[in-house]
Image: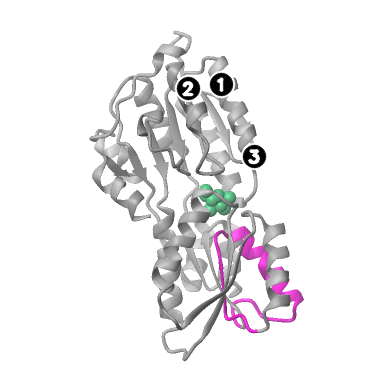
Amino acid sequence: MLRKLSAVVLGGVLVAATLAACGGEGSGTSGGGAAAGKDDGKITMGFSQVGAESGWRTANTKSVQESAKEAGIELKFSDAQQKQENQIKAIRTFISQKVDIIAFSPVVESGWDTVLKEAKDAGIPVILTDRAVDSPDKTLYKTFIGSDFVVEGTKAGEWVKKEFASAAGPVNMVELQGNTGAAPAIDRKEGFASVLGSDAKFKMLASQPGDFTRVKGKEVMEAFLRANKDIDLLYAHNDDMGLGAIEAIEAAGKKPGVDIKIVTVDAVKDGMQALADGKINFIVECSPLLGPQLMELAKKVVAGETVPERVLTEETTFTQEQAKAALPERKY
Ligand code: AHR
């Protein structure tokens, strides 16, 4: 994953919050995609969303839809229900509709080259939002806006290391991964392992996909609990799976946050409430509010302006005390 990190460092990178201040100029790829659309001065964006699997995704969809409206961009929105074939179909539909720009959050990292090439050949620029693709051909998209998922996993691992610093060990851990092949699942696992993987004190007993959903998080945690009597820590790749797991832990007669410590990623309201209530111990934030920057970038790309090839989202972490303070103002 250093591969990704170094690509980011070498290319044009911008932190999302500073985009407006910097005017969005960077050393990245240039835009120039207006050729495909109708020439009425109005931008039409085709947006293919992953699905509605989590509170994060719902907040992200809302942010994209509201920001499009505010920016005066006509949005053609399509929900892929966590299926890559639906996203490919939606992108092909957007191409045939001759939209001005396509934005999408790829459900998995691989398998996009053919359809992205079709968009490029049609002269329609593409923006990746939230999740990356693993294509070596960086000319297939103009920019990628979203979080650094490896860093998120690293932050979770660092918290665990500190929290169990005085424990003799072994620290028995289980992990709920996002859907197989998704960038956040691959990267959050990698970031976490980069901190704890080589420390013999920390033992990963089981690690399985919970597909970023509450239902699957609960189901997989039930199986973990049946197979392992002595779990000290759960690392869930998002709040929703952590919340499902909390139900399983309580049903097994244990106290989440006490008998089994829990660290998750996202910091959506329900997760923050569980953190404030002491059922989760630490949350690494992943911001879903990508809409405003996405629309700003889309306008620049369609106008043929240069945009940075990577726009990073600014994020923080929350302890239980910090969650209590932040909850009243939490927007999602
Ligand atoms: O890609 C972002 C991830 O997707 C969020 O962390 C998770 O909740 C969502 O489903």
Residue behind mark 3 = 83
**Residue at 35% over, 49% down:** 4
Residue at the outermost top position: 39
Evaluate if marks 1 and 2 touch, with contact meaning CB atoms under 8 Å apart: yes
Quarter of the N terminus within the rendering: bottom left
Is 234 in the magenta? yes
Residue 268, placed above or below residue 48: below
Taking 22 as reference, is 242 left or right?
A: right
Name the amino acid type tagged 2.
Answer: Ala
Residue 294 lies in what quarter of the image?
Answer: top left
Residue 228, placed above or below residue 289: below
**Residue at 67% over, 67% down:** 245
Residue at the outermost bottom position: 168
Q: Could you tell which of marks 1 and 3 lies nearer the N-terminus?
A: 3
**Alpha-carbon neighbours of circle 3 within 10 Å: few (<14), some, or many (≥20)?**
some
Residue behind mark 2 = 119
Of 172 and 41, nearer the camera is 172
* Mark 3 vs mark 2, CA separation in Å: 19 Å
Tag 1, which secondary structure? helix
